[in-house]
Image (cartoon, rainbow, N blue to C red):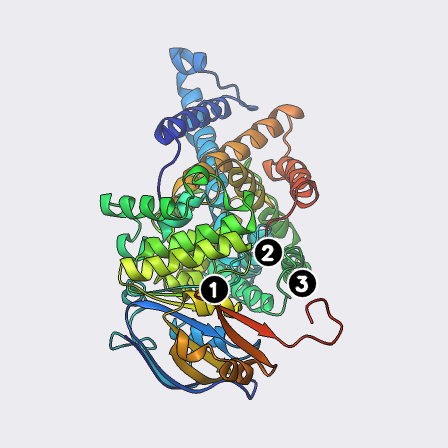
Amino acid sequence: MIEIEGLTKAYDGHVVVDGVSLTIPRGGLTGIIGPNGAGKSTLLGLIARLLAADRGTVAVDGLNVATTPGEELSRRLSVLKQDNSIAARLTVRDLVAFGRYPHSRGRLGEADQAMIGRALSYLGLEPIADRFLDELSGGQRQRAYVAMVLAQDTDYMLFDEPLASLDIRHAVSMMHLLRDASRRFGKAVVVVLHDIDIAGNFSDRIIGMKDGRVVCHGSAGEVMTGANLTAIYDIPISAHRLDGQFVTTYALPEGAAGA
Amino acid sequence: MATRRSGPIEGLAAGLLALLALASVSLFVGVADLTPGRLLDPATREAALVALLESRLPRTAALMLAGSCLAIAGVIMQMLTRNRFVEPTTAGTTEAAGLGMLVMLLFFPGSPVVVKSLVSAGFACAGTALFLRLLRAVPPGSPLLVPLTGIMFGGIIGSLTAYIAHHHGLIQSLGAWRNGDFSVVIAGRYELLWLTLALSILAYLAADRFTIAGLGRDMSRNLGLDHGRTLAVGLVIVSLISALVVTTVGSIPFLGLVVPNLVSLAMGDNLRRSLPWMAICGAGLVLACDIAGRIIVAPYEIPAGTVFGVLGSLVFLYLLLGRPSRAA
């Protein structure tokens, strides 16, 4: 369980995360949605101790992330940032192998190798496992990073917009995979998402943020209402159910193609 | 961490053999008449043995030590700054080490070389730390600005050093620190350089940490690595190496840039795998440059640093212009 209590972070006097208190249970996929600048990425960074909070605490399974040794946390919680401009020239397999570093400290045992193999195959990376990252497309690289986090095999996995460089086919398969990981291995997966429909269809829980605060938090069905989404994004949005899926529509200017 | 090529050990063994062959050539090239034949002939053995033990062996060892540790220092800096164009001479490290030496020469000329080297390493460390501090002001996504900043920063320290040295008639010492010249190496005057071997081994033991640091601060933290401590350890290793090389044989500009870039092109940046190759290639390249410098204008010599300077700047230009930069 991740327990967040009164979490606040400001940059140059501008409050980005404003007194957030939340509980994220172990297991299941939690989507975080909200407009640009709502504080989603900052919240994720604070939970993953990449940023230091001005006020408030984050505890993962009772361990305060600000005071727990990084080595210990890295076996419980992993995070993938949105921007991973890696200058180092590593093969996909090397990168994924480094996901085992918290456990192996550089000495890969059989269990580590098995985990690396599983992560590679899970993301369909075997054919390109020995290629260098800088020779791959953005989408392939993104999958390699996700494989690394999977190999890290922590109970809590945080992803900041993992779909950003993926087309719809890979985006959907990535979400299937993340949800599958959360279900099958009992992991808590927390994902910052921009696509509301994807958030609605793949999340067990959704956290809606605006101006650094949590505006709504609940099951996908509870959050995915026109009223909630309109409040979060400040434009008229309606939510529908079509063939069992969430579909959101938004107001178009008159004369636009769909109007 | 994971091995992917078949027989990395065999490859390394072949590389080491080639290096040993080059080292043997280095032992028998030069002004003094030293050949395997003269070593075996009882009449000339004694003189030949003196030349071998007092001059050629120390020189060859110094070349290999300096070449390998400078390559390693270069790649560590590249990992820590996440920039392909940073090495001790493009980050002010070497110049700061020179300033440290000058200060010691002026104020404590009688102190042992070890003390001078340590103080010089302290200066190198402070200079590099200052450079890293300056880097925070460099906008991200402009990889070339980083070495340019470093070269200018080093230039400022270098000019200051030159100004002070000029006032005290020590300009000649400056030249010796800046341009690696191995003709001065004789037994008893280079042994401090063996410390770099220990530093290189230390770097190898921490190879995984440096690779992870090369993945960036956030990725390091995610993997539970103390990024700040890794940075500090790397900084100390690099500073000590730079200072030891500067005080014993003189720096070899761009070596720490050329070798890591070429090795990285061939086998990537997983230091656990590539660091031994960095050492072998660095040693081999400096050996080759020194041998060439001894042959081209025999019986005179061109310093290895100068030969490499010509070669290295050409490769540097190629790396800058010839292929798309991945450093960001």
Mark 2 and mark 3 on one chain = yes
| Residue B10 seen in the current view | yes
Mark 1 residue element? loop
A240, above or below A126, in the image: below
**Can you give x and y, in whole percent of width and height, for residue B247 in the image?**
51, 50
Residue lying at 59% horizontally and 56% vertically, measured from the top left: B328
**Amino acid at circle 1:** Lys
B120, above or below B49, in the image: below
| Residue at the disc numbered 2 | B328
Residue closer to the observer: A223 or A56: A223
A119, above or below B3, in the image: below
Residue lying at 68% horizontally and 59% vertically, measured from the top left: B166
**Amino acid at circle 2:** Ala
Q: Chain of mark 2?
A: B
Q: Chain of mark 1?
A: A
Gap in Å between the C-alphas at discs 2 and 3? 26 Å
Q: Quadrant of residue B148?
A: bottom right
| Residue at the disc numbered 1 | A81
Of badges 1 and 2, nearer the viewer stands 1
**Can you give x and y, in whole percent of width and height, for residue B108 in the image?**
49, 63
| Residue at the disc numbered 3 | B156
Gap in Å between the C-alphas at discs 1 and 3? 38 Å
Mark 1 and mark 3 on one chain = no
